[in-house]
Amino acid sequence: SISSAQNWSGDAADRCFCKLRGEVDDCSCKVETLDSLNNNKIYPRLKSLLSRNYFRYFKVNLQKQCPFWSDDSRCALRDCHVNVCQEDEVPIKKKKEREEHEKTKYSEHNNVEGLEKDLSESCAEERELSALDTTISKEKMAEFQTWREHDESLPMFCEIDDEDSNGMEYVDLLLNPERYTGYKGASPHKVWRSIYEENCFKPENNLKYGPELVGDLESTMCLEKRVFYRLISGLHTSINIHLCDQYLFPDKSGFGPGTWGHNLEEFQKRFDPELTKGLGPQRLKNLYFTYLIELRAITKAIPYLERETFYTGDIKEDEEIMEGVSDFLSVAGSFQHHFDESKLFKGNTDEMKQLKAEFVQHFRNISRIMDCVGCDKCKLWGKLQTLGMGTALKILFSGDSMNPGSTINAKSKNFQLTRTEIVALFNAFGRLSSSIHALETFRSLARMDEQKSFECGLW
Ligand SMILES: Cc1cc2nc3c(=O)[nH]c(=O)nc-3n(C[C@H](O)[C@H](O)[C@H](O)COP(=O)(O)OP(=O)(O)OC[C@H]3O[C@@H](n4cnc5c(N)ncnc54)[C@H](O)[C@@H]3O)c2cc1C
């Protein structure tokens, strides 16, 4: 691979990476600790895991209408195009077979017998205390109960594509890597602007707002709103790092297919404080914040994920994936400096309930805006990463409900992640992990360049 860096000096390298030390904002964890954990332990494990069949095929609807404005530019660029899989190319057992499997899986997770027993006991008690509406069957009651508990305990952060809707297709993620696509200009700007301006929280008493959020977030926004902004900004950083990391340099003669490589100049344009009104380094730091949130969610879901069978129908493959996942989870589980989600939405006040509802609503809107992305490959990864982030938030805000140990808690029998959510969660985290890993590459390219400029006496 090749790299490009014109006008790049050692000073610029220092400037870009200047904030990448010390504590990640609102967390007690240091950037250096995360670099080492990620680059030595998490990244290599995830890279191998995400190439397995269970994780590499993502079911998604890329043909949904943009619900907010009429779609301007479906990108016709070659690099925006997504290769979808034919049904028989996907080495995952057919739907009916899978449904059978899911049924048994969920009954394992849900302990339906236990649930029926609990419910019949509580029904008996209610009957004694007051008149029970006998026109409602016991089964229906059980259903209502599960619906209610489910709705209460699991805020839906994303609009999930309907499994049976027209346009759902399997996409092979390895065949469609997230990288430079040439999607730029008015269309992505409209998407990013609408995400930040309409769907991120605004700092209090600050009318001037947009992606260029300047100043001290701590003094202008409460913790929950800062978390939201940093999450989105970290995702934005990650997407932009990937396009710099796998950039298509045009062929010098102008006729060939071009060459893929790292583009240091593009990286500098996006993260050098001198070229970003001082904001680039903080945006890089936000990537670590997003990483910490998703890592915490995965760790919190360990009891649930350990019971998952990662079914593809190939026994050997399934066993190997389970081993790989378990190895990855043990590394994630041994990490000590997690983000503490219990600090969020503290207190049972109406104000907090309102804030939580807004948080969920804003995030749902962002997931819907992904249908407005005018480049299929960007849309694919945008949808996957917002669903993955939404799944992480669903886990973080579902209390103790995914812990199979807490059997008395009826909610525990209800917590479910669909296959698509699990695939999105792991791949979304994999993207963040790959971005942090890529920063190492840019750091050393910058140093090499610094050396070159020095040798040439350029500074
Ligand atoms: C969902 C989505 C997915 C995309 N995926 C790809 C892809 O796979 N490949 C590809 O080549 N292009 C992709 N793009 C396009 C890419 O993100 C940029 O929009 C494009 O490269 C143009 O970049 P830009 O320098 O004009 O600034 P943009 O990245 O478009 O940013 C717009 C403005 O937001 C602010 N901003 C930038 N970064 C941050 C941050 N981290 N936090 C807060 N504010 C910020 C800046 O003020 C900037 O001017 C995607 C766009 C979207 C919306």
Image (spheres, rainbow, N blue to C red):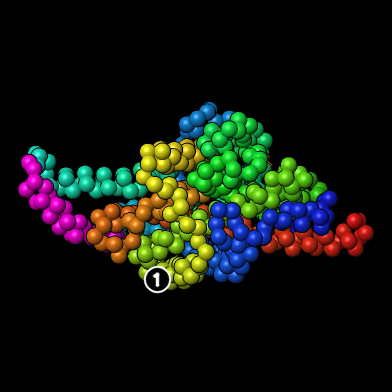
Task: Indicate the quadrant containing the N terminus: top left, top right, bottom left or bottom right.
Answer: bottom right
Q: What range is drawn magenta here?
A: 105-131
Q: Quadrant of ligand 1?
A: top right
Residue 20 lies, with reference to residue 370, above or below; the image says below
Q: Position of residue 454 (x, y in %)?
A: 88, 61
Q: Residues within 10 Å of mark 1 (few under 14, many from 20)?
A: some
Instruction: Describe the element under mark 1 as helix, strand or loop.
Output: helix
Task: Indicate the quadrant containing the C terminus: top left, top right, bottom left or bottom right.
Answer: bottom right
For mark 1, what is the residue?
Answer: 319
Which residue is outermost to the right?
A: 457
Residue at x 81% of width, y 55% of height? 11
Residue 380 visible, this angle: no
The reply to whether the magenta stretch includes residue 127 is yes
Left or right of 29: which side holds 18? right
Residue 108 lies, with reference to residue 259, above or below; the image says below
Q: Position of residue 253 (x, y in %)?
A: 81, 48
Q: Position of residue 131 (x, y in %)?
A: 7, 41
